[in-house]
Amino acid sequence: MPPPNCEHFETGAEVAAPLDVCTSCVEIGSTWFHLRQCLNCGRTSCCDQSPNRHATGHFHATGHPMMRSAQPGEDWRWCFADELIYIPDGAGRYEIAED
């Protein structure tokens, strides 16, 4: 049986579909590699492989711990606070990915 989800997993927020841009990068005229969406407020930001790492910056500025990939075809979530990655379990739920 997989371990239970962390205390941050259920955010209680309903977020709209992610944007197809990192708004912070657009504001400064920069580019991004992949996009992530905050599951606490819905903000779409760039990943840590991007020059500006806006998703991680958003976590540090707001304390919003849960994000998901905003890349087409990807379905996973990340808890910044607990450093846990979640993947679909095949039954419509998410489970912590094992190493």
Image (spheres, rainbow, N blue to C red):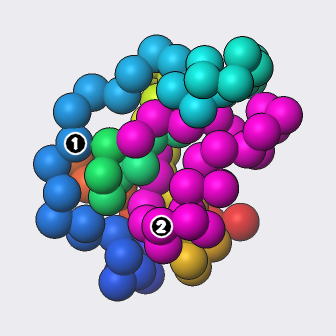
Indicate whether 80 appears above or below 18.
Answer: below
Packing grade of label 2 (10 A; few <14, some 14-19, many >=20) is few
Q: Quadrant of residue 85?
A: bottom right
Packing grade of label 1 (10 A; few <14, some 14-19, many >=20) is few
Indicate whether 6 appears above or below 10.
Answer: below
Rendered location of residue 92, percent (x, y): 22, 46
In the rendered view of the protein, which quadrant contains the N terminus?
A: bottom left
Part of the protein shown in magenta: 43-69
Could one spot residue 12 in this view of the protein? yes
Residue type marked 1: Val
- Residue under the point 25% across and 66% down: 11
- Residue under the point 73% across and 44% down: 53
Rendered location of residue 42, percent (x, y): 32, 43
Indicate whether 4 appears above or below 28.
Answer: below
Asked whether 77 or 87 is in front, the reply is 77
Asked whether 16 or 4 is in front, the reply is 16
**Residue wearing tag 1:** 15
**Residue wearing tag 2:** 62
